[in-house]
Amino acid sequence: MSRDLSPRLLRAFAAVAEELHFTRAAARLYVAQQALSRDIRSLERELDAVLFVRSTRQVALTAEGERLLPYARRVLAAHEELAAAFGRGAAPQERPLAVDVAAPVSTGERVLEAARDAAPGIEFVARYYSGLTAAAADILAGRIDVSFGRAAGLPRETLAGLEHELVRYERVAVLLPEQHGAAGPREVPLAALEGETLYAGAGNPDTAEWTSYARALFAGRGIQLAAPFPKIEGEREFRRVVRAKGWSVLATEVFIGMEGMVLSPLTEPVPLSPVSMVWRRGLRHPGLAALREAARELGGVAGWLRRPPESWLPPPDEALHR
C-alpha cells in the first residue's frame, strides 16, 4: 500500500460503506457516479483488496471492507480536524459548536455527553428545540450547527442543504393513563389502539416531521390523530396540557416520565423512529467529527442500528435509510 493514500479515496469508500448505494453516495459527495466507482476501484488496487460485493440489487461490504471502515473513519476525522485548524479565517474550533439535542432526555443528549467526554477541548453548546423541522431551518440559516431527528420527514428542498447520518432506530411507544385498559409494562399491539385518539404534535409547525410519521402509522389502523393544538413550550407545560386534555401520546422509548401514565412500546408490527444526526452541508468543525464518532461508538455498543423482526418504517424512511 502507498504511504500517500489520498483522503479522497477514503472519503469515497466511507460514503459508499455508509449508504450501501453508489447513487446516493455520489450525490452526497457531489461527484458523478462514474467518478465515485473509479475512486473505489483505485482504492481497491491500492489496498489489494475487494471492499464491496456489488449486484444489480444491492451493495454490501466484504470482510476486508468491514475491517477498513473504522480505520478510514479515524483518518478522515483527523483530516477534518487538520483542515479546520488551518483553514482560512478564524479557526472553527475556536467557536463553540451549537448542538440541538431536542430534549434533556434524548438520543441527541447522550451523543453530546459522550462527545464532550471524548473531546474535552472542544466547546459544545446545547440547544433544546422541540422538533427537527424548526431546527433544520436554523441550521440552514447558520443559527445552530447540528440537530437530531427524523430526516425523512423534512421537505426535500430542506434536506438538499443538509448532510445526515443515521444514528439510531428508537422504538415507538404510547403514553397511556394508568387506568387505560392497555396500559402496563408490556408491549401494546397496535390493534389494541383501534378507536383511540393520540396526540402527536398536530398544530405545532416545529414538529411537522413527527406528525407526518404519526399519520403514516395510524393510516388504515383506526387510530385518530388528536386535533391541532398550539405549540407547547417546555416539559412542565407539556405535562399540564396532557393531563388537562386527558390525551394519550405517541412517543418513543426515549421520553420523559409522567406521573399517572405508563410508557409502553408498540408491537405487531414494531414501529421504529429513525434518529439521524443532521448538519449543514459542507460544515467543517472538529466537534462534528467528535459527535459522529461518539454516535457510532454508542450505537455499536447498544445495537442502535439493529432492526428487530417485523419492524415498520414509513415508506420515505425506508427509501432514505435502506
Image (tube, rainbow, N blue to C red):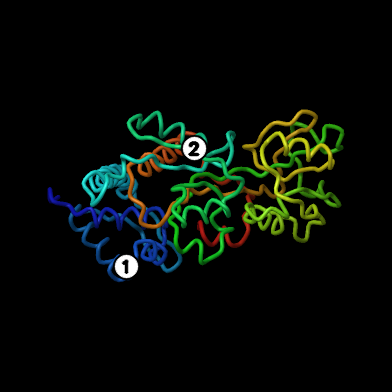
Residue 15 x %, y %? 36, 56
- Look at 84% across and 42% down and name the residue there: 245
Q: Secondary structure at mark 1?
A: loop
Tags 1 and 2 touching, CB below 8 Å:
no
- Look at 24% across and 46% down and name the residue there: 79
Query: Compared with residue 71, is residue 279 higher up or lower down, i.e. above or below?
Result: below
Which is in the foreground here, disc 1 or disc 2?
Answer: 2
Is 180 or 102 nearer to us in this picture?
102
The image quadrant that residue 74 belongs to is top left
- Name the residue carrying label 1: 31
Residue 128 x %, y %? 56, 40
Residue 123, disc? none
Query: Compared with residue 298, is residue 318 higher up or lower down, i.e. above or below?
Result: below
Q: Secondary structure at mark 2?
A: strand
| Crowding near the residue tagged with mark 1, few <14, some 14–19, many ≥20 C-alpha atoms within 10 Å | few
Residue type highlighted by circle 1? Val
Residue type highlighted by circle 2? Ala
- Name the residue carrying label 2: 126
Is 254 or 270 nearer to us in this picture?
254
Could you tell me how far apart the alpha carbons at marks 1 and 2 are, in whole angstroms?
34 Å
Residue 241 x %, y %? 78, 40
Image mark count: 2
Query: Compared with residue 213, is residue 252 higher up or lower down, i.e. above or below?
Result: above
Q: Reading the chain from its start, which is encountered first: label 1 or label 2?
A: 1
- Look at 72% across and 45% down and name the residue there: 250
